[in-house]
Image (spheres, rainbow, N blue to C red):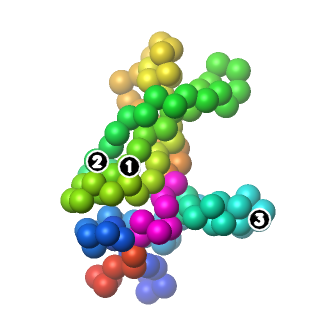
Amino acid sequence: MSQADVSYSCGSCGYPLNLISSNRITSGIDSEYRKSIKKGLISFISVDLSRFTQVDEVNCFPLSWGRYRSKTKLLCRKCGVHIGYAYGDSPALCGFDSPNSSSSAYKKFSVKIRALQPSEEC
């Protein structure tokens, strides 16, 4: 972690979420990124899933022909506050058979800005 990195914790209870600013998705700092910030969301490449309680929500929406994306709610493991969502390609959750149905590979993590606070620990 570099000196400029910020570590985030839960905005309600202060539980360290191991979210680091260098893992944010900022590759598209264009209108799409600004829309996300205006909605109050930050996207991350990866998160430490052990810091969250995961609740599967079978909200499947099509990406393209034959591909569907599922959404999983991420809650703080300590206090249960809703932190954000993990999006992944999980055909099994959407009711389709897949050779990789046992592993749900998350592609994107969207976290609510108001659910975070900068951590004191670095």
Q: Is residue 46 above or below residue 93?
A: below
- Residue at 38% from the left image edge and 35% from the top image edge: 56
Q: Residue furthest top?
A: 97
The answer to whether any part of residue 44 appears in the image is no
Q: How many marks?
A: 3
Placement of the N terminus among the 4 image quadrants: bottom left
Placement of the C terminus among the 4 image quadrants: bottom left
Residues in magenta?
Answer: 110-116
Q: Are marks 2 and 3 in contact (CB under 8 Å)?
A: no
Q: Is residue 118 left or right of residue 34?
A: left
Which residue bears the numbered disc 1?
74
Which residue bears the numbered disc 2?
53
Q: Is residue 5 above or below residue 59?
A: below
In this rendering, which labeled residue sits more in front, label 2 or label 3? 2
- What SS does tag 2 mark? strand
The answer to whether any part of residue 104 appears in the image is yes
Q: Residue furthest right?
A: 31
- What SS does tag 1 mark? strand
Residue type at mark 1 is Leu
Instruction: Where is residue 69? Give x, y as percent.
Output: 56, 32
Label 3 Cα neighbours within 10 Å, binned few <14 / some 14-19 / many ≥20:
few
Determine which quarter of the picture holds residue 29.
Answer: bottom right
Instruction: Where is residue 47? Give x, y as percent.
Output: 40, 56
The span from disc 2 to disc 3 (Cα, nearest Å) is: 32 Å
- What SS does tag 3 mark? loop
Which residue bears the numbered disc 3?
30
- Residue at 33% from the left image edge and 52% from the top image edge: 75
State the residue in front, 66 or 34: 34
Residue type at mark 3 is Asp
